[in-house]
Amino acid sequence: MPTAAITARRRRVNAVKWSALTGHVGPGYADGLSYADGPRRRTSGGPDGLWADEEHQDVLQRKRPPFIPEIDDPSFVTIYGVRDLPYGYDVLVENLMDPAHVPYAHKGLMGKLLKKENLGRVEFDIEGGGPIKMKTKVANVDGFLTEQQENRGYFRYAAPCTFYGSPLPREVKKKPQFMMVFMCVPVAPGKSRVIWAFPRNVGLWLDKVIPRWYYHMGPNALLDSDTYLLHVEERNFAAAGAENWHKAVYVPTSSDNMVIAFRNWFRKHCKSQVGWAVPTADQLPATPTKDKLMERYWSHVAQCRSCSAALKAMKALEVALQFASVAVVGFLAVAKGTLVTSVVQRAVVVSLAVLCFAASRWLASFIEKNFYFHDYVHAYK
């Protein structure tokens, strides 16, 4: 097959893949952000198909979704994930674009990003935060490009749903590469969904031995660590007014350029709101308890085949360990004086029972923290 035909086919597959994941085939890809309303009909493509109304059924031909070549590159391996979040689309996008919050909001989860031993470092703090010099350019209705100075990385916002980039320079070829791709999907006022893809061309063999659910533990922990902060921040924005967001925050540094550029884009092309298909008062939902706000099962596990399968297997193993501990104790009672006669033998059997019970308790705690709810307290990190 000619190279041009292969490239075109990959672009079509990539477009259908992302559109099927987000379900966003309505208007607004170039002008603002909105969800289509009216009669809907099915179009081909994707495992679940795509839905569009009469006016926008050919939207994929008129406006192609962003194409990420690394996702289809056979020399890369990509880890996917999804999470429903208790804050809106604009807060989600803004948070992903803010590199300065990482050492603080995700304290204790990413190690020391900057070390005191770094030569030339003058400004830093105990969490490892320091100046990040970034410059935003090529800003228009289609989004913008931001590059980190000293050729250290880049990030691009492809309006309205895609944000991707890498902490590594774009010009470096044939060296280890890692990308972060985020699809930010509006769900309802005060609710959003993030679909992530992390392509890399290093450590490919790890993908063959490490299960996908293990890869999801890290991103879920990161999302949990600032969920409550963002949930409250969104209410502060609402209190200040959509047009007065800058009065609720302080954005003085060059690392805030992406946040400012996005807020300007959101104001200019979307009037600082999502155009919902069904008329809504845009009222934020009530704040639930923290365990419901940061729950993982319905927001991720139930939607993830790997995590749901792992949860089912671990629950079965937990029951098996509990049964084994009881069975060992029962065996000790029955075999006392016959099969188990010495003190050493009894000690071994009792130790085995205790070990099985302790393992079941540890596994229960592991399941709760990684598949249901794990609190995050910044003061303890």
Image (cartoon, rainbow, N blue to C red):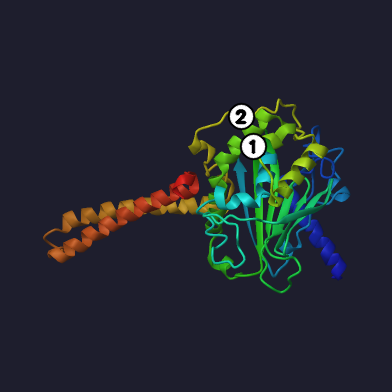
Mark 1 and mark 2 lie on one chain; the one further toward the N terminus is 1
Classify mark 2: helix, strand or loop. loop
For the N terminus, the image quarter is: bottom right
Residue type at mark 2: give it. Answer: Pro
* Foreground residue among 245 and 309: 245
- Percent of width and height locating residue 367: 44, 49
- Percent of width and height locating residue 176: 66, 70
The residue lying at 71 percent from left, 61 percent from top is 153
Residue 317 visible in the current orientation: yes
Residue type at mark 1: give it. Answer: Lys
Left or right: residue 57 compared with residue 165: right
Residue 350: quadrant of the picture: bottom left
Label 1 with label 2: CB-CB less than 8 Å: yes
Figure check: 130 above or below 260: below
Residue marked by disc 2: 285
Residue 338: quadrant of the picture: bottom left
Residue 376 visible in the current orientation: no
